[in-house]
Image (spheres, rainbow, N blue to C red):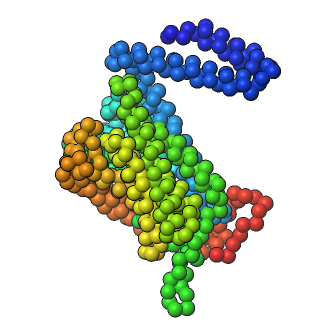
Amino acid sequence: MVVAPENIGNYHDNSIGKGNIVNTGEPRRARMGGGVAFLAALGAVLLVVSAAAADDGSSKVSIGLDAVWVLIAAFLVFFMQAGFGMVEAGFIRAKNTCNILTKNFLDYCTASIMFFLIGYAFMFGEGNGFIGWTGFGLSQGAVNPSGVPIWAFWLFQAAFCGAAATIVAGGMAGRMKFPAYLLYTIVISGLVYPIVGHWIWGGGWLDIGKSGFADFAGSTVVHSTGGWAALIGTIILGPRIGKYIRNGRGETKVRAIPGHNIPLASLGVFILWFGWFGFNPGSTLGVSTDGGSLASRVAMNTNLSAAAGAIAAMVTIWLCSGKPDLSMPMNGCLAGLVAVTAPCAFIEPWAAIAIGGFGGIIVVLGTLLLDRLRIDDPVGAVPVHGLNGLWGTLAVGLFASPELLQGNMSKGIFYGGGFGQLAIQATGALAVAAFVLLAMGTVFLTIRHTIGLRVPREEELRGLDIGEHGMESYAGFQIFTTE
């Protein structure tokens, strides 16, 4: 508006189209100057749009600004699929890399279709406290609880649905049949996840305006749902061959099966951290009404919790094993992100550090506990998403600030609020856990007794890349093992 179209065109002509920058005697400085100028111009445009939106909060400009915000957040959450894929691929054996990436790829594709056909209706449609049942296929009359166009809101929510489905792949990696996995992801993305979402975000019995249960961006809706599904699936599937070995005295020894590419996993963690700035701040669903104040607070809390989780996990594993194993700080970072996802809009920055730090401790102790229970989770999906999804949900009842409450919430215990908010947080989190464990346990048992859940022993030893997909992730390299 203030920056006229002809001026924008001249800017591009002078800096890029005519090639003046790359042909000067100081190319590096010129390129940096051009980049700074571009960012400055972009910032100016956004400031003008934001100012115009502030003048008339109900205008099309305001709605457009919020829609762009939600779309960008949706794109970031979509990019988290790449992060999940890299983390899971790096933490498993090379012979199963193609398999895990195929599952990640198809998770999002399946979730998109199922969430369009039935999932959105079950989650946000008019119905009862348990499930919605209007607006299938985004038909006319589909409910739009946001202040942005329904198409943008649907895309954002579909990306969340895909994230919940993908969590399970890591916990069941290395021994699950691919057709069985496809059936699982159809059910969780089309039915189980939308029902949980309806309870909490779709006007169901756990809605924040009714019960006061608070889960701002999905510690329970997304992460616990995926984490509990991974837990019951991993238990039913059983551990990988060679993970737990009995010695001559009848004792069971835990054998570490290291991931094949820690740099790849590290890249995945950074991608997920980056994507979380769409996951949590994007859940504000707009920035026009308050000038982005809430989104900014949420972004800061998200970052602080992730950093605290990584540091706490590193210190914890260092004390437990004598070495600062890199895999634990990486999962600690993710644990902090998961834990702060529910309370990020309701807490002060110091609380974000405390929540993330405790999450980092939980992920280390949770991993050790699973090994003690002989539950084989190759990437730590259950400690990261299940246990820390639970912790983050409960943390609302401890740290909710009286100045930041929404709906029917009460302030946290550390602000003198008593146990009321903690009680409703615990009730909601445990109800979701029970529902997911029961529903997905039924699904996995049904699959096991029909088409089969686990690949044969020979195929598991050879690798699922060859057995399930007829290809190799690293062609030309000998990666076959007998364990």
Residue 107 in percent (x, y) is at: 51, 50
Residue 402 in percent (x, y) is at: 24, 40
Report if residue 38 is visible in the image. yes
Q: Is residue 438 left or right of residue 69?
A: left
Q: Is residue 359 above or below residue 126?
A: below
At horizontal 49% and vertical 55% (from top left) the residue drawn is 311
Residue 103 in percent (x, y) is at: 56, 54
Q: Is residue 223 left or right of residue 430?
A: right
At horizontal 57% and vertical 18% (from top left) the residue drawn is 41
Q: Is residue 15 above or below residue 433?
A: above
At horizontal 41% and vertical 33% (from top left) the residue drawn is 296
At horizontal 58% and vertical 59% (from top left) the residue drawn is 326
Report if residue 121 is visible in the image. no
Q: Nearer the viewer, residue 443 or 334?
A: 334
Residue 195 in percent (x, y) is at: 33, 49
Q: Is residue 358 above or below residue 149?
A: below
Q: Is residue 167 above or below residue 460?
A: above
Counting every numbered tag in the picture gives: 0
Q: Nearer the viewer, residue 27 or 196?
A: 27
Q: Nearer the viewer, residue 232 or 369?
A: 369
Q: Nearer the viewer, residue 349 or 426?
A: 349
Q: Is residue 210 left or right of residue 455?
A: left
If the image is split into quadrants, where does the C terminus sit? Answer: bottom right
